[in-house]
Image (spheres, rainbow, N blue to C red):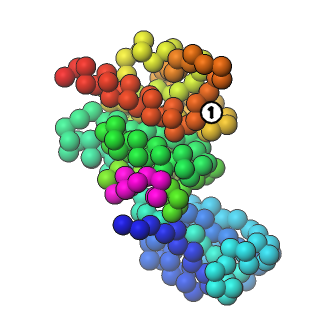
Amino acid sequence: MRFEELTIEGRNAVLEAFRSGKTIDKLFVLDGCQDGPIKTITREARKYDTIIQYVTKERLDQLSETKKHQGVIAKAAAYEYATVDDILKKAEEKGEPPFIILLDGIEDPHNLGAIIRTANLAGAHGVIIPKRRAVGLTAIVAKTSAGALNYTPVAKVTNLSATMKELKDKGLWFVCADMGGEVMYRQNLTGPIGLVIGNEGEGVSKLVRENCDFITSIPMQGDIDSLNASVAAGVLAYEIVRQRLSQK
């Protein structure tokens, strides 16, 4: 299956995309344009908590494929998002304790695609990403996932910390990756678990980290002190797999 990130241009086309329920990741609007149709579009965008960026005409012209954008361009997801309930339902259907990977601000589409691929191979029931300050399901993400997006649900949430609290009420506990944590081999990573991976440069944000139950680290024996985010996700995901298999 081929995935393409959709570029939707023109006022009527963008408004119809919102009203039809299409998932719009980002809306670009000509800065200073506040006429009736634009206000209607931005109002629809806010209903769905879509990110709105006000940009110059030059920037819109760069983004435009038709050169007839009428002051507004929408970027639609290359693939439909799931819900958190969809992920939990998948775990229930498989008769397994939930295993979810949560990504706190992953910005590189290649990293996101690789993590989704790993999530599928490691048997994770889904991936959760935040709406803001993170990459969405672009065409590059879909391609890098090597087909995993057909099988692994990805949910996009407004507030990652709030979602974690809701999942805790449903029995999940959370572990985040950080160099200051206990080595992963010494921790119990079984049961209904959420694995939190942080931003490529800054790691897990303070608020998300505070909502984690444990902090774990990957032992480092080399001369540098960090792993690529997707590699770290893979190492930790497979330690969870190893511990789950040891219980069978």
| Residue 32 against residue 119 in the figure, above or below | below
Camera-nearest residue between 239 and 128: 239
Query: For mark 1, what is the residue?
Result: 203
Which residue is painted at 36% across and 66% down in the image? 1
Q: On the rendered structure, is 130 left or right of 120? A: right
- x 50%, y 55%: residue: 141
Q: Is residue 170 visible?
A: no
**Is 71 placed left or right of 153 in the picture?**
right
Pick the front one: 97 or 122 = 122
In this view, 152 is above or below 55: above
**Callout 1 environment at 10 Å: few (<14), some (14 to 19), or many (20+)?**
some
Residue sitting at the far top: 186
Residue found at the far front of this picture: 222
Q: Is residue 143 magenta?
A: yes
Q: Three-letter amino acid code at disc 1?
A: Gly
Answer above or below: position of 108 versus 181.
below
> Percent x, y for residue 182?
51, 14
Is residue 64 shown in magenta?
A: no
Magenta-colored span: 142-150
Relative horizontal placement of residue 36, taking residue 188 as reference (left or right): right
The percent position of residue 216, horizontal first and vertical second, equals 50, 20
- In this view, 23 is above or below 216: below
Q: Is residue 67 visible?
A: yes
- Secondary structure type for disc 1: loop
